[in-house]
Image: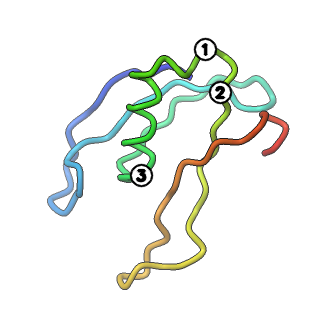
Amino acid sequence: MRFEGLRSSDYDDSALGAWAIFSAVTPDGETVTIGTGATDPVCKLVKLHELGAFNGETCVAFEESKKATAAGYHPLNLVRVKSAEAF
């Protein structure tokens, strides 16, 4: 995974006011670009980048909350998985 940068959010109700953009590789080897403005994943992805955790051995996955917010949304969380096969 590679941190590409932060982009300003166009949403007035954005908690962070920014989106994090990352390049990642899926378990089947496809390179994808991920953009998320969800608070938990953005904070964790930026911190992992700062710590140099994306050296090819750190595997993470997005996990949708089972419980909806009062507004009916299912927040995204970022969780560490043992390997890409865990997807």
What amino acid is at disc 1? Answer: Asn
According to the picture, the residue beneath numbered tag 2 turns out to be: 58
Label 3 secondary element: helix
Residue 27 drawn at (x, y percent)? 78, 32
Q: Is residue 28 above or below residue 4?
A: below
Residue 39 drawn at (x, y percent)? 35, 52
Of 29 and 69, nearer the camera is: 69
* Label 2 packing within 10 angstroms: few (<14), some (14-19), many (20+): some
What amino acid is at disc 3? Answer: Asp
* Label 3 packing within 10 angstroms: few (<14), some (14-19), many (20+): some
Q: Residue at x 14, y 59 (%)?
A: 12
What amino acid is at disc 2? Answer: Thr
Label 2 secondary element: loop
Coloring applied to the structure: rainbow
Q: Residue at x 41, y 79 (%)?
A: 69
* Label 1 packing within 10 angstroms: few (<14), some (14-19), many (20+): few
Q: Is residue 18 above or below residue 5?
A: below
According to the picture, the residue beneath numbered tag 3 turns out to be: 40
Q: Distance from label 1 to label 3 (Cα)?
A: 21 Å
Are discs 1 and 2 less than 8 Å apart at CB? Answer: yes
